Image (cartoon, rainbow, N blue to C red):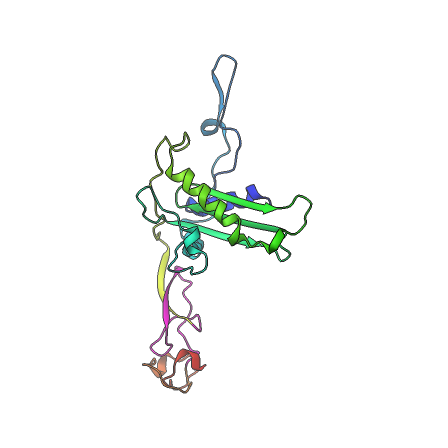
Amino acid sequence: VNLTNMTQAYGVFAQQGTRHPATAVIEIRDRDGRIVYSREENGPAATTPMTPAEAYLTHWIIQGNTDPRLNLWWGARAKLVDANGNRRDAAAKTGTTNDFKDVTAFGYASGSLATGVWMGNNNQEPLAAGLFSANGPLYLWHDFMDAALNQPWDWNGQAPVVAETFAQPPGIVTASICKFSGMAATGGCGPTTQIPFLEGTVPPPDNVHVNKTGGGGATPAPSASSDGGTPVPGPCFDI
């Protein structure tokens, strides 16, 4: 898998499940200026390797990497904004090999540009000073994306690219999930979080906190227990 392959894969999430094959040729003209090949008319056709709902699940996870509120380590340096300074709906992921021979950053702005960055030595020697991807490729990814999206270029019609969002598509349901068990929240599981799922894939109700001692909040009725035990109040970290 090379840099182009990976960047193209991230582009599928940017386009809500549609894959636009990478191509280096936009247009070919003959000596008289007549177009004999154009990407739009003759280029590789788009495919749909996944549904918008399937693409949304991965987008929902990695878009948090560009949100400083969710990614406290490098969210601020990955945050993309539009021409008005508003945060774009964007996603990014870094990658560092165990021996620091390769460091990468991949990401996209929803509905728009996908970019991949690789840093390394051609002789496969480790990078100096143990460079992590968040301290190298991520900066380059961010600065390129910011310039490409917010400055006038031929590719964007000489105007900043309007920010788009990947709205929750049909086929997705949001469920309250117990943070510690990963199962559907009940009254006694403690801290919860809202997570999207494909329809029909929401985990079963939490049964980890049944018959656990401790001081906690309300618990589900005994009939909600899968093992027939009597629920006892207890915080999530008491398991």
Q: In this view, does 148 lie above or below 178?
A: above
Q: Can residue 49 be seen in this view?
A: no
Using residue 8 as the reference point, say whether residue 204 is left or right of it.
left
As drawn, which residue projects farthest toward the top?
32
Q: Which residue is drawn at 39% across and 47% down?
A: 80
Q: Residue 187 colored magenta?
A: yes
Q: Position of residue 152 (x, y in %)?
A: 38, 33
Return the residue nearer the eye: 79 or 92.
79
Q: Can residue 9 be seen in this view?
A: yes
Q: Where is residue 114 in the image (x, y as percent from the top left)?
A: 46, 43
Q: Which residue is drawn at 34% across and 33% down?
A: 159
Quadrant in the picture for residue 228: bottom left
Q: Which residue is drawn at 40% across and 51% down?
A: 79
Quadrant in the picture for residue 239: bottom left
Residue bounds of the magenta highlight:
180-209
Q: Residue 3 colored magenta?
A: no
Q: Where is residue 1 in the image (x, y as percent from the top left)?
A: 60, 46
Q: Residue at x 42, y 32 (%)?
A: 155
Return the residue nearer the eye: 126 or 105.
126
Using residue 37 as the reference point, say whether residue 235 is left or right of it.
left
As drawn, which residue projects farthest toward the left?
84
Using residue 117 as the reference point, say whether residue 83 is left or right of it.
left
Return the residue nearer the eye: 193 or 83.
83
| Circle count | 0
Q: Position of residue 135 (x, y in %)?
A: 52, 53
Examine the residues drawn in magenta and state their main secondary structure: loop
